[in-house]
Amino acid sequence: MPPDDIIKAAGILFIAPKDKFLFMLRSNKGDMGGYWGIPGGKTENNETAEITAIREAIEETGFNPGPMDGELCRYLFNGVDFTTFVKKVDDQFRCKLDDEHTAYGWFTADEAQSLNLHPGVELALRRPKMDEMEISRAMAHEGLSSPQRVENATFYVMRATGTGFSHRPSLDEYVYRDPQIWLTPGLMERMSGIPVIWWHPPGATLDSEEHRKRVVGTTGYSWIEDDQINVVARIYDDEANQRLADHTLSTSPTVVFGDPTENTTLKLSDGSTLLIEGKPTYVDHLAICKTGVWDKGGPAEGIRADMVRADSIVKEPEGTQEHIPTGVSTSKGVTDMAEDKDKKEDATAKGDAAKADTRSDSEKIMDALKEVSKSCDSLKSRMDAWDNEKEEEKKKKDDAAKADAAAAADAKEKADKAAADAAAAADAAKGDASKPDAKKDDGDLHLLHKKDAADAAKADAARADATAAELAATKKKLAELEAALPEIRAMIPKQLSDEDFNAMADIQSRADSVYQGFNKKAPRPLDGETKMNYRRRLANGLKEFSADIKDADLSIIPEGAFFDSIERRVYADATEASLNPQDLEDNEIRATSRRDEAGRNITTYHGKKTFIHQMARPRQIVSRMGLPDRRSH
């Protein structure tokens, strides 16, 4: 759904002592009538989600909650982007119902299971208790927002691969991935468990060194959605998570085709190249990048980032270059030294897990909020450090620029002084008359700078127009390829089934027995050629020996009994011509071969007035036939 069509809303999950939650029964006046939900509603004007939640709570309950304790969950459901906040209260306050609700009550989480809960509320209650796979499935199928912080990783919904047509600018080629080949359960499963890396390596696939430098996470749960395969990726590297929060990035997979015949390259009528990719033999990695091939010339959409709010988006700086997070590489020595520490932390984690089993529902929710807050604080501190680093780098560049400017000014001053000394006499003679000229020079210099700025602005505008025109041309070409898909499919060689392969072999063998009479072999089937077209092509090569068929257009004769009779006639006439050649010259000998029913090769020699005829016995003619005289017996 386009972002402009998504409705933003927010609400509050109130928690009273003894783990009681406030739920309100929605009336039939609004959406989801008959469901139990929480106080909340749509965002108005430019409200933040928290302000929306507070305002809606006051309107629907008459209670002013004040600042929120934290954000519990965010999800997309039926076109609504809903944020659930948490607020702990000292007692179960009474609500003043408006016409949007008909009842309310305070329930424990177990008691709420018997209610007809709003799906989003039910999801928010389950979120603190979910394991990593349940979180992944909720992100994939229930609208749970991306990213989600889970223990030591941040989970993102990412595109593993797209399908259909796209364009690879680096290779200047169009590419097509057939959904029937790529959107399969088998390939979907293969997208799970592959490394997630920061930018593609120079050698396309990973090796030991590039793996150490670039891997920031791994893919997990995968599913097919529309025309692509999505995955929930676990990103462990803090700096990578920071940059994903700062910038709008995308994804690009790298796959290997071990069998070159899997792919087909076509030259289109306009001279462009179209690569039709088959089934890959190996999936190497999923790269995080600025834009991916399967963005199809549009904005970066390979990584879903629902949690980035409109009022907190950090625009990506111009000319962003590839950057490998510094925290990815780990030396062997550091790893060895950390083993004992890891064992202690594992034991502590097990003890914490045992304690977690005794926590109440409200404690689990509040602990989840603390983890989210802790992650946000950590991210903020890293962002502050990064900002300081950028400020320090900027200061160094400014200092260097000032030093260069001072040196240039000093050199200019010396040059100006030398010129002034050389022209002192002339300047003295002219006196004040030189001032208007100086003003004129200053004015000309000002106009020159103004012209340079205008030229630079024009150049920038021209580059922007060229980029927009190139993207528009790419999108137009992709649309044309989509429209021409049936014709392109017909150009793709298809792998024959065993039945079709055997049928083609029989057709070729039958024709070959006739072609051999002319010391030729029957042409083999062409890639993608149908059985009927193959039969027509073979018959066309022999029809010259049939006087009443040689000028016929066999391509218009449909498959059926009539074509079968034409084919038999052509083969019979060709066989007769091969056995009785009429185009032999004197003293010419021609050998013809054929196979009999037993598969033996039979060679027959034909000639006219050759040396063989000179060795032939004279022709004898029977003049009469007589019977023996029986009278002698």
Image: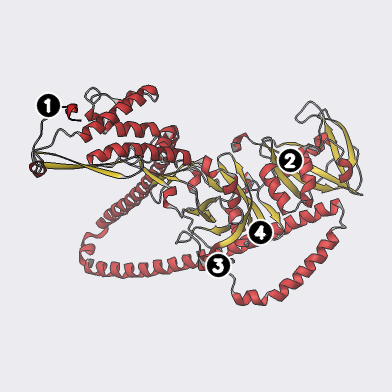
- Nearer mark to the viewer, of 2 and 3: 3
User: What percent of the width, then of the height, locates residue 31?
Assistant: 75, 30
Is 404 situated left or right of 386 in this image? left
Disc 1 + disc 3, Cβ < 8 Å: no
Mark 4 / mark 2, whichever is N-terminal: 2
The kind of residue on which mark 2 rests is: Ala
Is 363 situated left or right of 578 in this image? right
Mark 3 / mark 4, whichever is N-terminal: 3
Q: Find disc 4 in the rendering and name its residue.
A: 380
Mark 2 / mark 3, whichever is N-terminal: 2
Q: Find disc 1 in the rendering and name its residue.
A: 624
Disc 1 + disc 4, Cβ < 8 Å: no
- Nearer mark to the viewer, of 2 and 1: 1
The kind of residue on which mark 1 rests is: Arg
* Label 2 SS: strand
User: What percent of the width, then of the height, locates residue 534?
Assistant: 35, 34
* Label 1 SS: loop
Q: Total number of numbered labels? A: 4
Determine the CA span between mark 1 and mark 4: 125 Å
Mark 1 / mark 3, whichever is N-terminal: 3
The kind of residue on which mark 3 rests is: Arg
Mark 2 / mark 1, whichever is N-terminal: 2
Determine the CA span between mark 4 and mark 2: 24 Å
